[in-house]
Image (cartoon, rainbow, N blue to C red):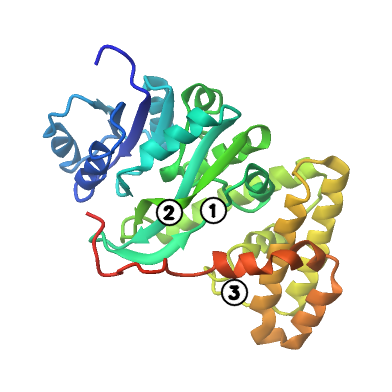
Amino acid sequence: MNSPPKVTVVIPVYNREKYIAQGMESILAQTFTDFELLVIDDGSTDKSREIIRSYSDQRIRLVCNPTNLGIPRTRNKGVDLARGEYLAFLDSDDYACPNRLAKQSTFLDHHSDYVAVGTWIEWMDEEGHPLGRIKRKAVSADEISAQRLFRSGLENSTSMARTAILRRYPHNEQIDLGSDFDLWNRMAASHKLANLPEVLVYRREHAGRTTHEKASLIKNQRLEIYASQLTALGIECTDTDLERHFLLRRMQKEDFTPNRDYVEWADNWMIRLQSANRHNELYPEPAFSYVLGVFWFKTCRQAFTQAGWDAWRRFLASPLRRSVWPGLWKLAWLNMPVTLGRRRSSSIS
């Protein structure tokens, strides 16, 4: 390839011999063809490197780390080596739909004021069968920015960004796991990000993806990021506040049912956040108040089994309800578990 490609797709690989072929083939089968596929083997000890080398497509570039450098350093290496104007990430065990690159590159071509765009993502099982669980990310730039205090605006495996901007926002190599949360958080604070409201990437669920030890490390590192954001917002918080803040968006995952004390804390806590933001203007309004209202609604809904109607009386009595009341229909739609008409037994391959 003499002229630079429009898009560089970066896939970091570490011991993914079972899945890397499918991930690579999902990129090679894209309807958009002006790309290079930069695969960085991060010191694999299985047959991953051998599988990558078995492909003869000239768009593939294989780079091998001499030792295992870890995800943040390997992704930064991919950004440094990228030749494309745009850079798309894909995890080595995930799968990109055929029109992913076409749709995302078209969006960035037509929206020069945006620096990155992601998509929704759906889980698939180990064999590649869709599970009907869709992660519907916020679409608008304001909502993505407003959610920074709670969640990542983009799923890294769905992201495409302007390469020049990514070089100004490297992954924090001190964050072993979850550095993408920090990256998109920092970027959304100063730039416009978007998500296309459709599934264009499938995330594979398998035993090797997340261990208990990894989950604990991710949580601790995320708490540090939350603490830094809260300090910038002018909020003093205790370790208990941080733990409870973390639970606001993970109640179902953690199988946590709020009691009356937690509901009271959540009400007071989010009113503090709203008040501090009105003073410091770190997050866009009214999007930030809407996000707080959503978490307030979900907290009271989750608390119903333990607190009963007291939870809904508290919901109605709080000023937080005013921010979310007109958008309750949207909450119901975003929590739909399965895309209509999908055959859950079919494979994505």
Dot 3, how many residues are within 10 Å of its Cα: few (below 14), some (14-19), or many (20+)? Answer: few
Q: Is residue 198 left or right of residue 299?
A: left
Dot 1, how many residues are within 10 Å of its Cα: few (below 14), some (14-19), or many (20+)? Answer: many
Q: Quadrant of residue 328?
A: bottom right
- Find residue 208 and report its horizontal and vertical position in percent: 31, 56
Give how far apart the Cα atoms at labels 3 and 2 are.
25 Å
- First in sequence: mark 3 vs mark 2: 2
Residue 256 is labelled as 3
Give how far apart the Cα atoms at labels 3 and 1 are.
22 Å
Q: Residue at x 24, y 39 (%)?
A: 44
Residue 121 is labelled as 2
Q: Looking at the picture, does residue 167 appear above or below residue 305?
A: above
- First in sequence: mark 1 vs mark 2: 2
- Find residue 1 and report its horizontal and vertical position in percent: 24, 16
Residue 36 is labelled as none
Residue 137 is labelled as 1
